[in-house]
Image (cartoon, grey):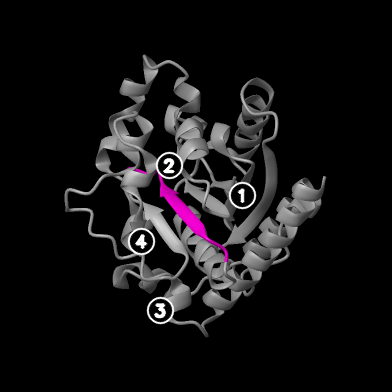
Amino acid sequence: MPRILAIANRKGGVGKTTTAVNVATAMAATGKKVLVVDLDPQGNASTSMGIDKRGSMLSSYDVLVGEKKLSQAIVWTDVPNFSIVPSSPDLAGAEIELVDMERREYALRDALSSDAVNYDYVIIDCPPSLSLVTINALVASDAVIVPLQCEFLALEGITDLIKNINAIKKNFNPKLELQGVVLTMYDKRNNLTQMVEEDVRSFFGKKVYQTVIPRNVRISEAPSHGKPVLLYDFNCPGSQAYISLAGEVLKREKELIAC
């Protein structure tokens, strides 16, 4: 069975999708077989990998509501070892359909357990809300990575997210762990960024990755070209930061597995 990592934060615009796509790309470059499951109705992870969502392809929505198998919705990308289950706008209404389903919190876990055995890692890009879709992602996951934007309101809501993770662990998924917190949109010239970093590292301690993701225009440009920033501009600071972050994630995975 693969290790399953959810990229989650209840706040939007913090770099969840960018982190999911680029960590997955860096893992794939090391020879790991990686599957990204795009659970955000906006489908930014799919767009970032050059997937044309206007077609009639199957999506994570079809898998989540039990209409199709996971393997039927998998799309191979141009990155070796990297495939994706694309998103669909229909995910925005999945909440209503899931409510009356048996084992509604386990729909994604059941789909992955029977159909994702050939992967080393599954990375789930979660929507910016605590919906049944996000709960499905957390119930299915072994660990959570939380991207945190370096701004004044960064910590607002994150304590609630940690409470949510602990509640999922207690009631549905006892193996779930917070793997780490990654600081994104980091500007070392900004005093506010440094203050936020100090607060976050004081609150979360060693759970905060040493790697920070800088503000970098190349990171912002890459999705419009349908590429992860690692392929768009390998030498830019953003790419090098995500390579470093992926190394930290893999190292922590070894530590968690050994526990």
Q: Is residue 234 magenta?
A: no
- Residue sitting at x 62%, y 27%: 168
The alpha-carbon separation of the residues under discs 1 and 2 comes to: 14 Å
Residue underneath mark 4: 76
Among the 4 quarters of the image, the one containing residue 185: bottom right
Position of the C terminus, as image quadrant, is top right
**Label located before the other in sequence (1 or 2):** 2
Instruction: Specify the farthest residue to the right.
Output: 259
**Taking 31 as reference, is 4 above or below it?**
above
Residue underneath mark 2: 127
- Residue sitting at x 28%, y 60%: 51
**Label 3 sits on what residue type?**
Tyr
The alpha-carbon separation of the residues under discs 4 and 3 comes to: 18 Å
The location of residue 243, given as percent across then percent down, is: 60, 72
The location of residue 81, given as percent across then percent down, is: 47, 65
The alpha-carbon separation of the residues under discs 4 and 2 comes to: 22 Å
Q: Which mark is residue 232?
A: 3
Dot 2: within a 10 Å radius of its alpha carbon, few (fewer than 14), some, or many (20 or more) residues? many
